[in-house]
Amino acid sequence: MTRTEEQNELEPRARFVRAARGEPVDRPPVWLMRQAGRYLPEYRAIREKSSFLAMCDSPDLAAEISLQPFRRFGMDGVVVFSDILLPLRGGGLELEFAPGPVIANPLRGPADLDRLAVDVAAAIAPTCEALRRLRRELGPRAALIGFAGAPWTLAAYATESRLSRDVEVLSALAWRDPDTVQKILERTSQICAEALRLQIEAGADCVQIFDTWAGVLDRTRFEQLAGRALRRVLSLLGPERPPVIVFARGAAHLLDGLADLGADVVSLDWRSDLGEAAARVGQRVSLQGNLDPTALLGPLAGIARGVREIVRAGRKARGHIVNLGHGVLPSTPVEAVATFVSTAQEGGG
């Protein structure tokens, strides 16, 4: 069988994993961050009857919500419906969503570190059960994606009641008491790694680490703080792990550091030029992204044009997974997502 014939026979699950590892594929796979959510009427129908945490804590509802966009659009990847902060529950941190995350008793210093003694397995047991159900349902029709919050991002949320735009509390603590911050990051690294390990055991083909707030750091402090913690997570997962995607918003200045972590894929936000990033990272990692989510609020022809442009740019990368540069916005029209996915699955034209 020739390489071309082998590529032509790829199932979506295999296509996704191969692209993440930089292996040949027939076309780049496609999925969207936050693809299961508020832009879908069937999601809103469930949400009217349930709280966000109740949906996360019901394997039935979490699996159903995860499948809703797949039934409509047939993406190559299905991401489990959950939240990055769920693993923080079960210890001494009091988490609620009102509607965004609120920590009633955030960490303030060394005396509070015991609050991070959480039972990760218990906290995400419903998510893992949803993953097992999704794995049985999907078979080879789509890759199953798990995810977790990165150590720095988990620490950012854990140290403020309502997280500030500039991550003021954790950033200030890192200057004032770096030893305590390193201890916090050591523990959140363990939490992140354990959450990912459990999801992999439950059937995830690929996992994504969201370091949403790494972009507030300069290159030096990224290496000292967020980057060091991410390396620890990857080390804890071990060499037999499935592909790992790392996403950091507003982090174009950190591209080299992200590419050198040892992950398989770096996900770019919309402010990075995909072609330039591909030339810069070379064969170190595959790339994911990176259409501006607000482009899905514009004309369908513009969406198709934007997707074709990033598919062309992605051909310069070791491997490419088509995605947005951040999550789907709640006001996004359903037909916009349909255009995004179908254009990507046509290979970009």
Image: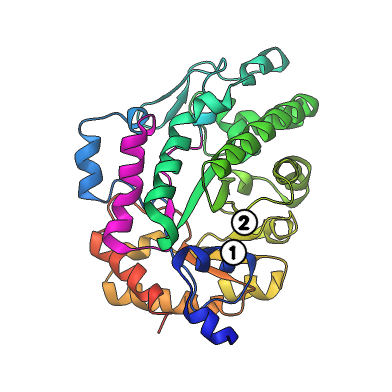
**Badge 1, how many Cα within 10 Å: few under 14, some, many 20+?**
many
Q: Mark 2 points at which residue?
A: 243
**Residue 116 location in percent, x, y?**
63, 21
**Badge 2, how many Cα within 10 Å: few under 14, some, many 20+?**
many
Q: Does residue 296 show up?
A: yes
Q: Is mark 1 on a helix, strand or loop?
A: helix
- Look at 56% across and 63% down and name the residue there: 17
**Residue 173 location in percent, x, y?**
70, 27
Q: Name the residue under label 1.
A: 20
**Residue 231 location in percent, x, y?**
74, 46
Q: Give the range drawn in magenta.
A: 56-84
- On screen, residue 191 versus residue 37, left or right, reads right
**Residue 167 location in percent, x, y?**
59, 35
- Look at 70% across and 60% down and name the residue there: 259
- Look at 46% across and 63% down and name the residue there: 323
Alpha carbon distance from label 2 to label 1: 6 Å
Name the quadrant of the N terminus: bottom right
